[in-house]
């Protein structure tokens, strides 16, 4: 359930071009063919009673409350309006004495098997059973269900124990009305099939599959069942504790790049629950365990809410006023620049903050700092996407909206596991697969995308880490040599010269699948068949993740996919495209905001005098005309003694950057490290100034998701620290002598829209009106652009680029015979700063090493025992999990936990074009371990010291 | 030279339940050295009170005798057996009133021959129907069924030809034919008799149906409680496949049809066509809403022709004999013959295939010879556990689809159960609700909860603790179940209850 009722039309919308005319209660209506009577009535303002129907589920017809009468009805029975479509000329009556009488009798049956204790039920006032009872005059005093006329009841389901095993919600079987909405939501919306109906007839009950309880079941805690429950049977624990919310604020989730719209539901201005919004265009009312439930970190006891400073990192932190902290930081930065020169400081914008907050940080750097030493954490994830798609198509972003996948015929998922990393979009992919679309998955691991209930990839290509480029080249080779390309499309839409060069290149025998079997570890026939499937699909779509970008050939691979998509005519229409699955809520936005050293907002090259000139004019400064340092350059310069001060907005380099020891050394070499974050992160241990940041519940601004959708983030409370993040940055600018005087984040967006042409039509007013828009949003597309490159590429003609495969220098050898690749799990998010501070830890907070049984047995490794993971760069220990989901010779871990510090073993290798680190390939050896590694022990000691806060 | 002798011992569930197999075993032992004697395991004639009914054919003359409660274990030679048989006044069953009064169009082969002898089947007109269908084509085959007036024999009595036409008219690459062999009504056995005694006629009917609507795959959904039927169907499908009567290019025509046998899991409601489809698809046996009709969106969302065993077997009979032979009988919506199944407290129970319109009196006395207990008949339930109970003064009601509807009942699958005057009618009323309580799929509320409340209310009335309001509540409950249930299970459960309240009002209380 969800307070602040959204209109529920009862059955899903139907796509048809044909319309029908009918009458409901004497009023003439026109609806799309296939529309149910219930929906037709609802669309015309007539609400038909219902309990089992919901417009996000296929009609079911079990509660029977929605029965109606119509002129052509025959026989005894009244049809259920949810399952009966409108027919031409139908004359429907939804309410009359007879129907009310029958509905009342039906409700009495429900109530006869339901507790009569509404006043002590947590769902009191937020219960559809109660609502229907109220309509039919079956409620007594205090809105409690009245006893029914059945006064000789011998059989009921009362008194059963509550299943409270899940950390976020309870299941109370005695309040269950067996409408099956939870089961259907789990199947149809989430696609996990964790719930089922047990037994039959009156004994029918909802069970979490064959498990004893929800926690032990296959449930992924997405919340869809809780959302769909019409009674208090499935209910959030926070509602049980705090009561039914009385207010809701529409906002956007702060976790991954899907950017789900949520209603923050409040009671007494305190968040009681987060419920997904049906109007959210990215999520359509669906959610995952992180966004739906894991928001408790926002008021976690570890949260730092006061500014702090210290001279040396070995000193204890000292809490100070905002003024003191800002002037301390400004003085230090000014002093450093005076001593070491203008280039000696820089800053990092965050992919977790709003667009406005990111924009103002890069503005601070380009104005108050007077240099272009700005970078963003997209550097370490999707910078190759930005580069590769810009080179080929002309924009640094994915081509489609999420809904496009519902029209794909072939879905090619490469180096991504959306089921855990982008769960809400994965549910949409799964839905399409269940509808019959074909699926190709290229991933070393047998992920949930490869096989799960009602999902089986037509082709799983478990390629060796680092061999993406030969694979994609082989796909293109097959498309070209077997004449599966769309020559007409190419002739009209692409640059023929580059195409011809590419055609000649890709036709070379070295790209034939038979010649890349060793490099990829794949079978040539399988590659050939999968490639044919992609190339011959009507609408073929590519979805990819960091398994594509985080390689030394990340940019090559992105361009390889773009080449393939263009050659087969799969860019510029619905159902196809090349789509990055973005990891963070605003990683797209932070890139859009000019966070890279070489680009101004809207991807305008810094070296272009005209474009830069517009910014200079607006900002009243001279902007340096050469790109500044990338983050990796900053670290190298720091170690070389040339880079001394950094302002880091919400990024935990010391856990997320590869080769941690190198990064630690860089930070120790600096004189002023300013960290703006929610918690004392690993990086904050090396900081001199700590600015307490705001959580997404306090922010006022916009996030841009992976489909370029700009969503509003609305505050439900004032910043706990007393300052919005844009205010902190503005204060720092002022303290350093640069004038900024925004009075709201809305004004910052107005400035963005003036400076970045793709944002020209964006304003908070418009977003509030339309809900969201996808950029480009300008005069040509005032309501945004769901799908890009329709008719013409942004750059004019699509460019083919030769994608020669240069293998990484990181190779397995006798000393390091295994290849480590990294990824995520469902319940933890990135470096775990947030999710480790929620009840999600019930599902585990440790990183584990997945290893193939044969690799484990030759090393004497037992399941669930500690192992030492060693690379050329460093070593750490973690638990091994033996599984056949990982191929022989490959091991896998996550990087959620700082104690593991998985990145202590990863290398500094990076993408040739963008320096995106090669997290996905590290040669390692694994052996049984007795105790934690030396690095882990020393680090724990050191960090404990660096984290002390002086008691006041 | 000795005369050739054939000994017929039925291999059919009711005959086997009273010892047919052990008789066959014994006779087999006794005839080991007798080349001139052969044993035929035929089907049952449907005269169950005679089972095990053993027949001997010598010189083309076939007579039989009931071996019920007869011990033959002491016999030491086949001569002794035949001698004993001849002393028992054997008779020709075809000359008995029970059979003579019947018009066996669909059940013409049961009892007569070995159900798995495909040559005998073809020699008795088998596969002539399919040949004719191939000859006249799809539409004309459907027309033939329409003209015959055949209605579905599973219970709903929907016009078969119209259903076939609907499936035929769907533009779809894949279509299915599904045979509903989940004969779950207590006291019914006509489907079982066809499957055990003449399985080829069912499969031929399915093949004709599949050809005419454009399906290439069929399912038979058989209840698990029919192991012998499973045996016969499995064998029959195998035999027909090896005779090019199933599979690819049947009878040399460019037509492929395969049949898969699916066994139910003990659920009554899976005999409801939509629940049956769910079950065939491997899902929980939940009833689906209609629309969409299965003929438009059925099994695996494809157009599906779903028919009962008798309906499909009738199709081969109609194609073989011509629609007029069928439609000459009966009137209105009740054309052709109907296989009534007489059982309960009755002397001569069994299968009675006669034209529609027979009365209960004729059935009970002319065929059934009165109650087994010799007590007066008190009530008759027609149409299975969800059928109405009729009192003696309505026994002259002609049994047709329409006449039963007129008295708020349904002919259903043709089951007729006889009760004598020792019957506790209140418990019969409770049984109806209790049956629904146990067999409901659990999807819709009136059926799932209503049936439980129904049992409780009837108990209360029976115990004498009910007040007027409880009786009104029971009436309302019946109305709610009838008018709001998702399928006929909940919708028809009130029928027996109401009929008892109406016709036996004084018997509701102990």
Image: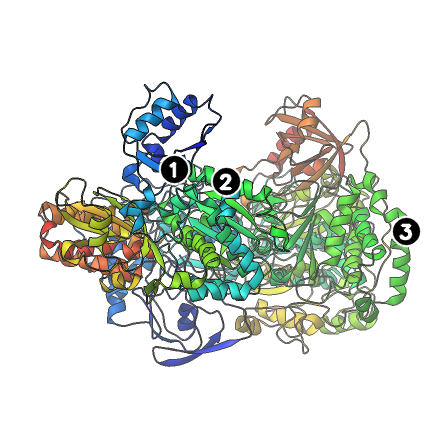
Residue at image coords 34%, 75% = A71
Query: Of marks 2 and 1, which one's residue comes earlier in the chain?
Result: 1
Residue A297, image x and y in percent? 51, 47
**Disc 3 to disc 2, C-alpha distance:** 66 Å
Residue A364, image x and y in percent? 69, 62
According to the image, label 1 marks what residue?
Answer: B12
Residue at image coords 37%, 42% = A199
User: How crowded is the residue under tag 1: few (<14 C-alpha within 10 Å), some, or many (20+)?
Assistant: many
Instruction: Return the residue nearer the eye: A5 or A454.
Output: A454
Q: Quarter holding the C terminus of chain B?
A: top left
Residue at image coords 49%, 67% = A13
**Disc 2 to disc 1, C-alpha distance:** 15 Å
Q: Secondary structure at mark 2?
A: loop
According to the image, label 3 marks what residue?
Answer: A508
**Disc 3 to disc 1, C-alpha distance:** 72 Å
| Above or below for A160 versus B397 | above
Horizontal side of residue A370 vs A317, given as left or right? right
Q: Secondary structure at mark 1?
A: loop
Instruction: Return the residue nearer the eye: B108 or A363.
Output: B108
Q: Secondary structure at mark 3?
A: loop
Q: Chain of mark 3?
A: A
According to the image, label 2 marks what residue?
Answer: B117
Label 3 or label 2, whichever lies nearer to me, is: 2
């Amino acid at each position: 359930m969800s307070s602040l009722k959204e209109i529920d039309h009862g059955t899903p919308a139907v796509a048809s071009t044909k319309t029908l005319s009918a009458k409901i209660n004497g009023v003439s209506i026109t609806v799309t063919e296939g529309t149910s009577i219930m929906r037709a009535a609802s669309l015309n303002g007539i609400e038909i009673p219902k309990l089992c129907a919901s417009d996000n589920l296929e009609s079911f017809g079990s509660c029977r409350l929605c029965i109606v009468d119509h002129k052509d009805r025959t026989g005894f029975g009244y049809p259920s309006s949810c399952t009966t479509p409108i027919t031409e000329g139908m004359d429907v009556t939804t309410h009359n004495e007879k129907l009310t009488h029958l509905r009342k009798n039906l409700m009495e049956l429900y109530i006869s098997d339901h507790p009569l204790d509404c006043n002590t039920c947590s769902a009191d006032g937020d219960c559809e059973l109660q609502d229907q009872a109220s309509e039919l005059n079956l409620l007594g005093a205090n809105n409690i269900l009245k006893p029914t006329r059945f006064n000789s009841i011998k059989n009921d389901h009362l008194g059963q124990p509550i299943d409270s095993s899940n950390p976020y919600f309870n299941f109370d079987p005695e309040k269950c009305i067996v409408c099956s909405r939870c089961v259907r939501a789990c199947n149809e919306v989430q696609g996990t099939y964790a719930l089922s109906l047990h037994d039959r007839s009156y004994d029918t009950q909802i069970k979490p599959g064959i498990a004893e309880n929800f926690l032990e079941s296959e449930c992924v805690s997405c919340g869809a069942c809780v959302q769909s429950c019409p009674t208090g049977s499935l209910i959030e624990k926070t509602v049980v504790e705090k009561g039914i919310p009385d207010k809701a604020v529409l906002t956007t989730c702060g976790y991954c790049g899907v950017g789900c719209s949520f209603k923050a539901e409040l009671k007494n201005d305190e968040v009681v629950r987060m419920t997904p919004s049906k109007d959210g265009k990215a999520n359509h009312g669906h959610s995952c365990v992180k966004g739906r439930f894991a928001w408790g970190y926002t008021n976690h006891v570890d949260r730092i809410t006061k500014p702090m400073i210290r001279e040396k990192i070995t000193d204890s932190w000292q809490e100070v006023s905002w003024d003191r902290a800002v002037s301390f930081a400004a003085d230090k930065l000014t002093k450093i620049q005076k001593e070491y020169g203008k280039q000696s400081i820089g800053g990092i914008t965050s992919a977790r903050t709003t667009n406005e907050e990111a924009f103002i940080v890069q503005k601070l750097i380009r104005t108050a700092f007077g240099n272009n030493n700005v970078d963003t954490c997209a550097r370490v994830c999707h910078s190759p996407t930005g580069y590769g798609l810009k080179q080929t198509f002309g924009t640094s972003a994915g081509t489609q909206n999420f809904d496009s996948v519902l029209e794909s015929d072939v879905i090619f998922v490469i180096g991504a596991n959306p089921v855990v990393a982008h769960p809400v979009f994965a549910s949409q992919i799964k839905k399409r697969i269940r509808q019959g679309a074909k699926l190709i998955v290229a991933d070393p691991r047998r992920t949930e995308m490869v096989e799960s209930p009602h999902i089986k990839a037509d082709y799983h290509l478990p390629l060796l880490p680092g061999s993406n480029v030969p694979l994609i080249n082989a796909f293109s080779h097959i498309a070209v040599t077997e004449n599966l390309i769309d020559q007409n499309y190419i002739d009209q839409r692409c640059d023929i010269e580059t195409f011809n060069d590419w055609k000649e290149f890709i036709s070379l025998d070295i790209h034939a699948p038979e010649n890349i079997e060793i490099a990829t570890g794949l079978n040539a026939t399988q590659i050939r068949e999968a490639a044919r499937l992609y190339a011959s699909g009507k609408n073929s779509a590519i979805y990819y993740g960091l398994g594509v970008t985080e390689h030394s050939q990340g940019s090559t691979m992105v361009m390889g996919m773009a080449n393939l998509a263009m050659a087969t005519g799969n860019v510029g229409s619905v159902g196809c495209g090349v789509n990055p699955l973005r990891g963070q809520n605003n990683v797209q936005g932070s890139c859009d905001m000019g966070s890279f050293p070489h680009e101004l907002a809207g991807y305008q090259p810094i070296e272009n005098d005209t474009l830069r000139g517009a910014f200079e004019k607006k900002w009243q400064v001279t902007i340096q005309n050469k790109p500044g340092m990338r983050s990796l350059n900053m670290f190298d310069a720091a170690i070389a003694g040339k880079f001394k001060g950094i302002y880091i907005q919400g990024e935990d380099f010391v856990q997320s950057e590869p080769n941690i020891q190198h990064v630690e050394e860089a930070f120790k070499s600096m004189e002023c490290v300013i960290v703006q974050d929610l918690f004392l992160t690993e990086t904050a241990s090396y900081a001199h100034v700590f600015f307490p940041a705001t959580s997404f519940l306090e922010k006022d601004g916009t996030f841009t998701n992976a489909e370029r959708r700009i969503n509003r983030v609305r505050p439900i409370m004032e910043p706990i620290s007393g300052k919005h993040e844009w205010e902190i940055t503005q204060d720092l600018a002022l303290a350093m002598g640069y004038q900024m005087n925004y009075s709201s984040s809305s004004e910052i967006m107005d400035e963005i829209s003036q400076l970045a042409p793709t944002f020209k039509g964006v304003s908070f007013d418009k977003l509030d009106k339309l809900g969201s828009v996808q950029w480009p949003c300008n005069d040509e597309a005032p309501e945004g652009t769901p799908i890009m490159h329709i008719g013409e590429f942004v750059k004019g003609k699509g460019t083919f680029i030769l994608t020669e495969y240069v293998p990484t220098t990181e190779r397995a050898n006798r000393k390091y015979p295994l290849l480590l690749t990294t990824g995520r799990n469902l319940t933890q998010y990135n470096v775990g700063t947030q999710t480790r501070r929620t009840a999600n830890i019930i599902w585990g907070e440790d990183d584990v090493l997945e290893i193939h049984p044969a690799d484990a047995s030759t090393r004497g490794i037992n399941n669930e025992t500690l192992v030492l993971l060693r690379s050329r760069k460093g070593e750490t220990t973690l638990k091994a999990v033996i599984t056949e989901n990982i191929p022989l010779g490959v091991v896998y871990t996550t990087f959620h936990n700082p104690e593991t510090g998985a990145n202590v073993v990863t290398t500094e290798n990076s993408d040739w074009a963008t320096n995106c680190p090669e997290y996905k390939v590290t040669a390692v050896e694994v052996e049984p371990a007795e105790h934690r590694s030396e690095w882990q022990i020393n680090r724990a000691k050191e960090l404990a010291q660096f984290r002390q806060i002086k008691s006041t | 030279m000795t005369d050739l002798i054939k000994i017929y011992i039925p291999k059919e569930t009711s005959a086997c339940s009273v010892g047919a197999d052990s008789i066959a075993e014994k006779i087999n032992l006794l005839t080991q050295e007798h080349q001139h004697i052969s044993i035929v395991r035929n089907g049952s004639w449907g005269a169950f009170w005679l089972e095990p009914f053993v027949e001997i054919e010598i010189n083309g003359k076939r007579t039989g005798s009931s071996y019920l409660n007869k011990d033959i274990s002491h016999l030491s030679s086949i001569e002794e057996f035949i001698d004993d048989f001849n002393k028992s006044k054997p008779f020709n069953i075809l000359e008995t009133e029970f059979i003579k009064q019947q018009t066996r169009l669909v059940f013409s082969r049961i009892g007569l021959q070995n159900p798995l002898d495909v040559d005998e089947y073809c020699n008795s007109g088998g596969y002539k129907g399919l040949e004719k269908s191939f000859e006249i084509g799809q539409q004309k085959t459907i027309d033939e069924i329409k003209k015959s007036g055949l209605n579905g024999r599973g219970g709903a009595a929907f016009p078969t030809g119209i259903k076939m036409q609907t499936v035929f008219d769907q533009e779809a690459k894949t279509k299915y034919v599904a045979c509903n062999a989940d004969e779950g009504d207590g006291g019914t056995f006509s489907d079982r008799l066809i499957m055990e005694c003449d399985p080829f006629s069912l499969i031929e009917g399915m093949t004709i149906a599949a050809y005419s609507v454009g399906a290439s795959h069929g399912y038979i959904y058989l209840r698990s409680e029919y192991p012998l039927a499973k045996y016969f169907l499995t064998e029959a499908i195998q035999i027909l496949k090896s005779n090019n009567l199933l599979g690819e290019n049947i009878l040399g025509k460019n037509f492929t049809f395969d049949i898969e046998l699916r066994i139910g899991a003990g659920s009554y409601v899976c005999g409801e066509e939509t629940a049956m489809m769910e079950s065939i698809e491997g899902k929980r046996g939940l009833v689906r809403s209609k629309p969409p009709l299965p003929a438009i969106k059925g099994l695996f969302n494809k157009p599906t022709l779903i028919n009962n065993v008798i309906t499909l077997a009738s199709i081969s009979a109609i194609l073989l004999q011509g629609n007029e032979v069928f439609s000459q009988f009966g009137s209105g919506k009740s054309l052709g013959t109907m296989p009534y199944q007489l059982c309960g407290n009755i002397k001569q129970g069994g299968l009675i295939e006669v034209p529609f319109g027979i009365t209960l009196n004729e059935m009970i006395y002319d065929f059934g010879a009165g109650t087994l207990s010799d007590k007066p008949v008190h009530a008759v339930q027609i149409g299975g556990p969800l059928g109405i109970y009729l009192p003696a003064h309505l026994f002259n009601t002609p049994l047709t689809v329409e006449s039963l509807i007129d008295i708020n009942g349904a002919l259903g699958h043709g089951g007729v159960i006889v009760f004598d005057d020792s019957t506790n009618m209140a418990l019969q009323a409770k049984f109806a609700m209790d049956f629904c309580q146990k067999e409901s799929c659990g999807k819709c509320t009136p059926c799932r909860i209503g049936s439980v409340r129904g049992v409780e209310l009837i108990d209360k009335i029976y115990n004498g603790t009910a007040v007027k309001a409880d009786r009104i509540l029971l009436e309302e409950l019946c109305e709610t179940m009838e008018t709001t249930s998702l399928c006929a299970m909940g919708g028809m459960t009130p029928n027996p209850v109401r009929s008892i309240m109406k016709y036996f009002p004084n018997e509701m209380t102990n």
